[in-house]
Image (spheres, coloured by chain):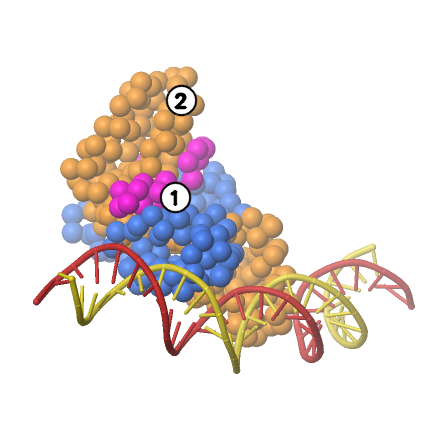
Chain colours: A blue, B orange, C yellow, D red
Amino acid sequence: MAIDHLDGRLIVLLAREPRIGVLEASRRLGVARGTVQARLDRLQSNGVIRGFGPAVDPAALGYPVTAFATLEIKQGQGADVRAHLAGVPEVLELHTTTGHGDMLCRLVARSNADLQRVIDRVVGFDGIVRASTAIVMENPVPLRIIPLVEQAAEDND
Amino acid sequence: MAIDHLDGRLIVLLAREPRIGVLEASRRLGVARGTVQARLDRLQSNGVIRGFGPAVDPAALGYPVTAFATLEIKQGQGADVRAHLAGVPEVLELHTTTGHGDMLCRLVARSNADLQRVIDRVVGFDGIVRASTAIVMENPVPLRIIPLVEQAAEDND
DNA sequence: CCATCCGCTGTACAGATTGCCCAGCGGATT
DNA sequence: AATCCGCTGGGCAATCTGTACAGCGGATGG
């Protein structure tokens, strides 16, 4: 479950240069190929590495606007709302949370005007009481994991 | 920039089975290998596909708690706050937004107790006026892109 | 102190894949 | 009618993958 230093270096290496294969990785890390293969297998069956899916940029697909919506849900409607939101392609992510709202979701849209359409579709569902939306202007820190991996690796030296 | 139906099928296929190579993909899609290679190259130079980095699960690394913090920033301190937050490994993502707060960031922590430490570190910086945190309880829709890809592909049939 | 287990190393081999190239073909454009 | 462009189908050498094996050293347990 916890990762050691070599695991950390391997993950960081794969994150930086995803196209390299096992053999090249073993050369870079200075270990035998079998070791890298064993580590990779372990990391994947561990669930530490979920997969190597393509990282698609919504902006390049024509959805340059991102927003976060905080939703307030009518008691007992949670399941229905989840199913509703799961059916909206522009909902990239949905969390249930503590705090002021009950749910937080990440949305994308083709434009600010289009965002209105998306929000209407999202909140146009019985069970959603109120929604407040924050439009993303800038993304100074894009979703990242490497610093955390490095810290986790150091913790287990 | 826009993607056609074949691009869409290719992305979906890669997302479902990331380990398959170009040759296998061409067999599945029923097109020539060169076509898949050309499409992949184009998608990557387009920026539609940013890469194939490993998807690391913070929970498996020992950080099972996720939270979103809305930050209010003192005017003119934006750049400093960004740099500060970029230096905290537990900050996985940071956006500047419209609306009530000025920034929204995604945090992870080893436990609810550890979350306190992370938040203290995040907000313990001159320039951050106020922070409100929502702890994630459930994640009914994990970060996804396939439905959007399918929609974008259909739009360009 | 000794036996055992486990992970890493280094090597080997057949089979599959990659990167690259080319000629031909059909649809769309001009 | 001429041209451009993307896709096809084929071929080639070089590389990588999957898999297996024996040896080695450190850690564990008796």
Quarter of the rendering occupied by the N terminus of chain A: bottom left
Up/down of A24 relative to A15, above or below: below
Up/down of B115 relative to C19, above or below: above
At 36% from the left and 26% from the top, the residue drawn is: B84
Up/down of A68 relative to A6, above or below: above
Residue B85 placement: quadrant: top left
User: Amino acid type of disc 1?
Assistant: Ile
How many labels sit on residues?
Answer: 2
Secondary structure beneath dot 2 equals helix
The magenta-colored residue range is A132-157
**Marks 2/1: CA–CA distance:** 22 Å
Q: Which residue is mark 2?
A: B80
Q: Position of residue A33 (x, y in %)?
A: 44, 62
At 56% from the left and 48% from the top, the residue drawn is: B47
For mark 2, name the chain: B
For mark 1, name the chain: A
Q: Is A133 within the magenta?
A: yes
Residue B98 placement: quadrant: top left
State the residue in front, D16 or A44.
D16
Q: Is B68 within the magenta?
A: no
State the residue in front, B71 or D1.
B71
Q: Which residue is mark 1?
A: A146
Q: In the drawing, does residue B127 fall left or right of residue A102?
A: right
At 24% from the left and 31% from the top, the residue drawn is: B119
